[in-house]
Image (cartoon, rainbow, N blue to C red):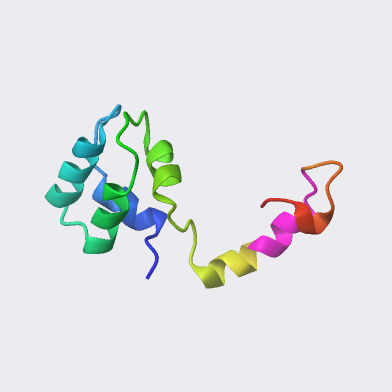
Amino acid sequence: MPVTHAAVRAALADVDYPASKDDLLAAARRNNADGDVERALRAVPPEEYRNLGEVLRSTGTDDEAPELSARLRAPRRREHTHPGLAEREKDV
């Protein structure tokens, strides 16, 4: 099962940024994160993270549940934010 942004947020709720990879792993253990979240955090590059957004991008976690994602994708596709690109080529 993929790790969600919500699970990573819960595991890192008390982290003070900037934080190292070791700080993130320690917080996840302190907050009793499940094994999938710990594995995702162990896989991130060993650098200094300035905020939670950087951590989420590095973990490659799923932002939304698949059923929610499909429902939200249609309205996002109607908003053309990338001039010069075909609708199917837009990154939403």
Q: Position of residue 15 (x, y in %)?
A: 24, 37
The total of numbered circles placed on residues is 0
Q: Nearer the viewer, residue 3 or 9?
A: 3
Q: Position of residue 92 (x, y in %)?
A: 66, 52
Q: Chief secondary structure of the magenta span?
A: helix
Q: Position of residue 17 (x, y in %)?
A: 29, 29
Tell me: residue 60, above or below residue 74. above
Give the residue drawn at x 32%, y 31%. 47
Tell me: residue 15, above or below residue 48. below
Give the residue drawn at x 14%, y 51%. 29
Q: Is residue 4 magenta?
A: no
Q: Residue 58 vs residue 17: left or right?
A: right
Give the residue drawn at x 49%, y 61%. 64
The stretch of residues the image draws in magenta is 73-81
Tell me: residue 6, above or below residue 68. above
Q: Position of residue 58 (x, y in %)?
A: 41, 43
Q: Is residue 75 magenta?
A: yes
Q: Nearer the viewer, residue 44 or 69?
A: 44
Q: Residue 41 vs residue 1: left or right?
A: left
